[in-house]
Amino acid sequence: SVIVFMVFAGAIGYYLKEFDQMLMWPMHTVAMHYPGLIIELGTGSPMEGVNVIIQMCLLGGLMLAAPFILFFVGQFVAPALTKRELKAVLPMCASAFFLFIGGAAFGFFLLVPSAVKMMIGINQEFNWAFRWSVESYYTMVTRLVLGVGATFQFPLIIVLLTWLGLVSTAFLRKYRRHAIVAIFVLAAIVTPSTEPLSQTLMAAPLIVLYELAILISARIEKRRERSGGAVIVALLALLPQMQRPAADIERARGPASV
């Protein structure tokens, strides 16, 4: 895992300018809709540029190496798991990876341009000069991409709690309104601004994922009920044999067994 992380971090350091242009894509895309607007990022301290480069290499290398690290950890843990646990863990790991990628892409391609557009509008409204620092911009991008990617994991946690029997579908449906309020509070924490549009864009997919988690949890409960019903039927079928006298059982075995 350490070797893979160092390889990706070194690759980002080698192609640092190309990686920087990719991270600047949201700002350049929004700036195209404002002809004549000049936005120049600057550093406010001698070490700010160095800190940003280190941040890009470390966080970028960690994100790119994450699938390989999860695979290595899975190889280490798999021999200690039962078949039933493997059937649950493998789909959840795959779902966690794709949910994180989807959340990170949603944050980078939708929320970051929306936040930049809102900030440009505020500066133009008050005739403020654009003196944004490099560190503040990359911190905003990192916070949105990683924060949204991590936030998209919460439906998986709900499904896991349902699979463990700690949460029921009835409970999730009963407290649906409370969950929606909590989602909007979480969206307000993750998004860098207090603009209602950005918070709504963040909260909408989370609400959809919450409803999807309820549907998956309902299927898990139905499957559990079917397996429980099968066990009850098997026990009822064995009950008459358990109630037979011992003499009948010995007679049924025949003289050879006696």
Image (cartoon, rainbow, N blue to C red):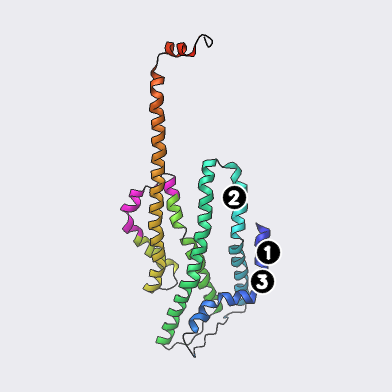
Q: Along the line of sight, which residue is nearer the eye, 186 or 165?
A: 165
Q: How far apart in space, not on screen, are marks 3 and 1 (Cα)?
A: 10 Å
Residue at the location (63% across, 76% down)? 18
Residue picked out by circle 1: 7
Q: Along the line of sight, which residue is nearer the eye, 196 or 30?
A: 30
At label 1, the amino acid type is Val
Q: Along the line of sight, which residue is nearer the eye, 136 or 108?
A: 108
Q: Magenta residues? A: 160-179
Residue picked out by circle 3: 13
Q: Which of marks 2 and 1 is nearer the N terminus?
A: 1
Q: Which of marks 3 and 2 is nearer the N terminus?
A: 3
Residue 41 highlighted magenta (yes or no)? no
Q: Earlier in the sequence, mark 3 or mark 1?
A: 1
At label 3, the amino acid type is Gly
For the residue carrying disc 2, how many other residues have a C-alpha within 10 Å: few (<14), some (14-19), or many (20+)? some
Residue 57 found in image quarter = bottom right
At label 2, the amino acid type is Gly
For the residue carrying disc 1, how many other residues have a C-alpha within 10 Å: few (<14), some (14-19), or many (20+)? some
Task: Answer with left or right where residue 130 lies relative to residue 194.
Answer: right
Q: How far apart in space, not on screen, are marks 3 and 2 (Cα)?
A: 28 Å
